[in-house]
Amino acid sequence: DSPRRKRRKRFSMDSCSKRGMSDGELVRGFNELHYSNGGEPMFDKYNGISIVAAGDGWAEGELEVSRHSLNPHGIVHGGALAALADTVGGAATFAAYRRGCVTVNYSMNFLRPAWGSNRKIRCRAQAVKLGRTLSVFGMSLTDDEGMEVASGNFTFYITGWMKSEEEKEPGAI
């Protein structure tokens, strides 16, 4: 028998109302929900993606550029840019609905190379449509000099309230 890991108490959706969270609380709540996995980093944190600001229907995040995020040509990999946009769009959806979501569809336009010499790639997600079950967000990704390197549109399905650690099935991630 392996010793049971002490479960870290997660941010609870019961502690926030639809309009009662400050922008800072939104970022902290999203990060606590999204970046805790029994003490192990989740995909975004592991890949250098973080949410830095959020408000009602928008969010901003950044990708810390490293050699691991580059393609063989020394350019930030398109998949890393798409992952950044997806994460920031998910945070913006959380900010708008205070509920979880999954990506239904997305399209990205890679406008110019995001060279590996950049320290960070920044992304801003802004609501285009907030529906009952689907939301659409426009994304803009910029480099260190403020040049837009990619843009996209993401559609998210609103899944319902995020489960706290206590509500999850044993063994679930």
Image: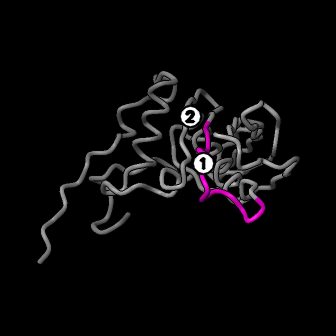
- Left or right of residue 131, residue 91 in this image: left
Amino acid beneath label 1:
Thr
Image location of residue 162, percent across then percent down: 44, 48
Circle 1 residue = 87
- Magenta stretch: residue 67 in it? yes
- Left or right of residue 119, residue 40 in this image: left
Residue 75 vs residue 49, the one in the foreground:
75
Amino acid beneath label 2:
Ala
Circle 2 residue = 95
Classed neighbour count for the residue bearing mark 1: other residues with Cα under 10 Å, few (<14), some (14–19), many (≥20): many
- Please say if the residues under marks 2 and 1 sit with CB atoms less than 8 Å apart: no
- Magenta stretch: residue 10 in it? no
- Left or right of residue 51, residue 128 in this image: right
Considering the image in quadrants, where does the N terminus appear? bottom left
Compute the Cα span from label 2 to label 1: 12 Å
Residue 12 vs residue 118, the one in the foreground:
118
Q: Which residues are magenta?
A: 61-73
Image location of residue 130, percent across then percent down: 70, 38
